[in-house]
Image (cartoon, rainbow, N blue to C red):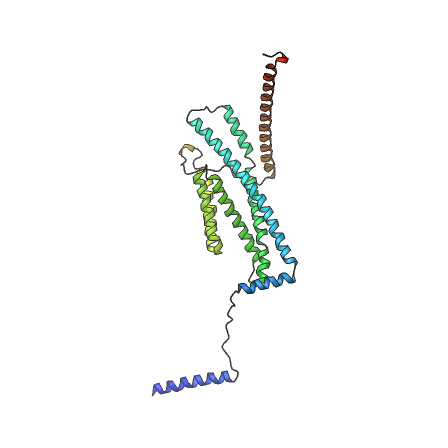
Amino acid sequence: MQRSLLAVALVAMLATAAAQNATGGPEVPEVDVPEEFNPREAISNLVEYQEEHPDFAAGVATWLTIGTIIFLVSFILFLYSEIKAVLVARDQDFRKKLIEDGYMSNGANFNELFEKEAATMAPRPYLSVGAMLLMFIAFACLLYPLCDILTVIGLPSAPCLLIITVGAFFASICLATFWMFVIWSCTRTYASLVFLVMSLSGQILLPTGNPILLLVWLVLAFGGGYFYFYFYPDQFKEKPEDKPMWLQDVGDFTVSTNYEEWGSAFNKAYEAETAALKKQAEAAQKTFEEQQKKLTENTPLNGGSK
């Protein structure tokens, strides 16, 4: 009996629902299914937009050209600064090795040479960091046209400027650390491997766009770099002989916020380079005069030997 009553109640409920739908009662809301991205349609929309706006391609080309020029300038400046630092470091390592092995004595000439090299390398942090900032600007210029392109083809582009800024910043760091690895691998193997880990981890984690992975990379890259190049080496300042062999430096990378120190660094480098060129010119002039004197003495017409 109870089963019969339940069946009758269920049939009544179904009949009531059907009557409500038939008489305009509440309907089940439809779910909007997002349309799939169609590459052909996107290309077609982009072509149509270009035909309606002829200046669109010119604007994209302008941004790409500006970004490419800035990137080339920054890349050349960065390579110049770091390669010069590597050459100086190799010379210093060679002289230190000769002194330690007893082939040379650490005299005044060596100390003077170290001071001149330090003055020459004073602008290096500003050149390298400035080049990285130019790389950031270059990547931002290269990526900026993507905002307009994404809007034209119908893909969500917001917040495009934020994505471009963050992406350009991380891309410049990954590129700079990779080339630091390439340049310093010939003389600072362990330090160059640190740069390689920073670069590869960024290239793997950053394209995911996951905020947690981005945070992890920031902590590993900047925290690990600070620990390896600054914090841990400071523990061996008083006893540098206890410093482990795998703990290597790549020179001073401290950038001052005082603009007067910027000018002082470049002025020191200019004076050191000028003094070196003047010394070379004087040596060349002296050699030339000695050769001329010998040539004159050996000429018969001038009373020289026959």
* Horizontal and vertical percent position of residue 44: 58, 64
Residue 239 can be seen, yes or no: no
Query: Image quarter for residue 266?
Result: top right
Q: Is residue 271 left or right of residue 85?
A: right
Is residue 111 visible in the rendered image? The answer is yes
Q: Position of residue 85 (x, y in %)?
A: 52, 36
Q: Is residue 62 above or below residue 2?
A: above
Assign the C terminus to one quadrant of the image.
top right
Residue at 51%, 33% in the rendered image: 88
The residue under the point 51% across, 45% down is 176
Decide: is 7 above or below 265.
Answer: below
Quadrant of the snapshot with the N terminus: bottom left
**In-image side of 264 versus 94 (left or right):** right
Q: How many marks?
A: 0
Q: Nearer the viewer, residue 179 or 284?
A: 284
Residue 142, above or below 191:
below
The residue sitting at 53% across, 31% down in the picture is: 117
Residue 252 at x, y = what percent?
Answer: 51, 37
Question: In this image, 124 relative to 102: left or right?
Answer: right
Name which quarter of the figure residue 130 lies in. Answer: top right
x then y, percent, for residue 261 = 59, 36
Could you say which is closer to the camera, residue 71 or residue 272? 71
Task: Say which of 253 and 261 sits in front.
Answer: 253
| Residue at the extreme front | 306
